[in-house]
Amino acid sequence: MNHSAEGQTASGEPQSTDIFTGVDSYIGGLFAREDEALQASLEDMRKAGLPEISVSPVLGKFLYMLAKLTGARRILEIGTLGGYSAIWLGRALPQDGCMITLEIDPLHVKVARRNLARAKLLGLVEVREGVAADLLAGLIAAGEAPFDMIFIDADKESYTEYFELALKLSRPGTLIAADNVIRDGAVLDPAAIASDSRVEGVVRFAGALAKHPGAEATMLQWIGCKGYDGIALAIVKPRS
Ligand code: SAH
Ligand code: DHB
Ligand code: MG
């Protein structure tokens, strides 16, 4: 099989690359074109020295579609970075919707607020600074209304704990999605699980999710311009 392809980036420049990256760019060029606000957010993050680990345009559009499919009016995100996925998710909300996104790093918070302001989403999307587990406990203690969709994308070591806290902020039918659950296939490699706490974290999460009585779930492997990874999807069950 020929693994080369001519593709287009979401912003339109041609590029010659691996066929999976090429096809990702093809899909992105058709369905996930980045407007000025999304492009500027990536540029701002690069200039500020943030890691280039935002979701891809095609995954951003996928999250947007999931939010629309669930009719989400209230979204919670764990792990903001520079606000790129928050822009995609925030755009799926109705005018009177709301999103809260949690971030530990003060620089990331600053960049994210700037990017959300540029995308005219600061009225809808609130960035909360702090340790996610503490902020989640605070939301639970405050009796926050349940969220319709929750996106887990912070430190991989804590995914199992975040899922349990997310359940406490959910209702039956809430969609809980978690990014980066395949890690280049390292989840199959015992040596990687033993040596990389992030891989161990997502493998432990997958095992807990698979047998969790509170949710139905599956995972999708995902390949594209950010390499090979995957996303877990869970629907909260009726309380029995
Ligand atoms: N969702 C973003 C990417 C998030 S990257 C996007 O796709 O655009 C993961 C983020 O989680 C980083 O910004 C990191 O600082 C943050 N993070 C890591 N550990 C955290 C913790 N314990 N509490 C809150 N945020 C955390
Ligand atoms: C990492 C985190 C992410 O959320 C991601 O999408 C890719 C990589 C990381 O911490 O390595
Ligand atoms: Mg991620």
Image (cartoon, rainbow, N blue to C red):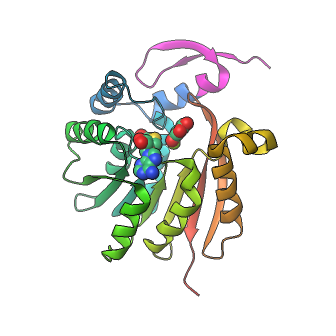
Identified at 51% across, 61% down, the residue is 162
Identified at 40% across, 31% down, the residue is 33
Q: Is 201 above or below relative to 172?
A: above
Give the x, y percent position of residue 119.
24, 39
Identified at 44% across, 14% down, the residue is 13
Give the x, y percent position of residue 39.
33, 27
Residue 93 seen: no
Q: Is 145 above or below relative to 217?
A: below
Give the x, y percent position of residue 180.
59, 44
Q: Is 162 above or below relative to 12?
A: below
Question: Is residue 157 one of those drawn in magenta?
Answer: no
Q: Is 81 above or below relative to 127?
A: above
Which residue extends farthest front? 195
Residue 213 image-quadrant placement: bottom right
Question: Is residue 6 one of those drawn in magenta?
Answer: yes
Residue 84 seen: yes
Which of these two is toward me, 193 or 69? 193
- In the rendered view of the protein, which quadrant contains the N terminus? top right
Identified at 68% across, 57% down, the residue is 204
Q: Which residues are magenta?
A: 1-23
- In the rendered view of the protein, which quadrant contains the C terminus? bottom right
